[in-house]
Image (cartoon, helix red, strand yellow):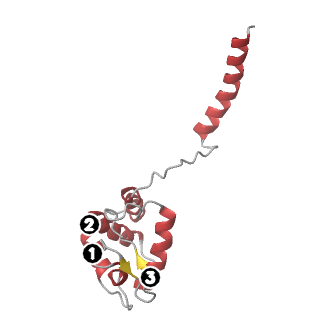
Amino acid sequence: MNQITSVNKVKQSIATPLLSLLLMGSIAISPTVSAETPLTILKQYEALSKQTASANRGQVLFTSNHGRDWSCSSCHGNPPTQTGKHASTGKNITPLAPSFNPERFTDTSKVEKWLRRNCNDVFGRECTNSEKADILSWLIKL
């Protein structure tokens, strides 16, 4: 057996089990760039709510008060395409609409964190997946 044949057999003996593990999902490969976009996150919320999002409902949810002191637009503006200002702290808030701030809605864990906080402030509870989808649908259209 020559060296080339020997090297190829070693490569195959390593590659075949590694490929099998990858195909079975036993090895997770995390990309360096996030594949999440506002649209993919919207589709996740639509799937969880089992209904198509409505930008019109999203606008109403965003701009209306829901029994609390603030609406979403109290801090983010109406429309939320410019820098907003937190109603109690005065801290600047970067634009919420993805077309005016490409970093918005690109990380599901961050989206969930901020929606949990902000929905509690505005609604006094967590938003439903349907409400999240509706609001995001409207923000994407801006």
Tell me if I can see residue 75 in this picture: yes
Q: Quadrant location of residue 69?
A: bottom left
Q: Residue at x 53, y 47 (%)?
A: 31
Q: Residue at x 33, y 71 (%)?
A: 135
The residue that disc 2 covers is 142
The amino acid marked with disc number 2 is: Leu
User: In the orientation shown, which residue stands out farthest toward the left?
Assistant: 56
Tell me the number on the disc at residue 79: 1
- Whole-number angstrom distance, CA of label 2 to CA of label 3: 23 Å
Q: Does label 2 or label 1 sit earlier along the sequence?
A: 1
The amino acid marked with disc number 3 is: Lys
Name the one closer to the observer, 82 or 98: 82
Percent x, y of residue 38: 38, 60
Q: Which residue is drawn at 48% across and 76% down?
A: 116
Q: Which residue is drawn at 73% across and 12% down?
A: 3
Q: Residues at badges 2 and 1 in contact (C-beta under 8 Å)?
A: yes
Circle 2 packing at 10 Å, graded few (<14), some (14-19), many (20+), is some
Percent x, y of residue 58: 30, 72
The residue that disc 3 covers is 91
Task: Please indicate whether residue 110 sits to the left or right of residue 37 in the image.
Answer: right
Judged from the image, the secondary structure of the residue bearing numbered disc 3 is: loop
The amino acid marked with disc number 1 is: Pro
Task: Please indicate whether residue 29 sits to the left or right of residue 44 in the image.
Answer: right
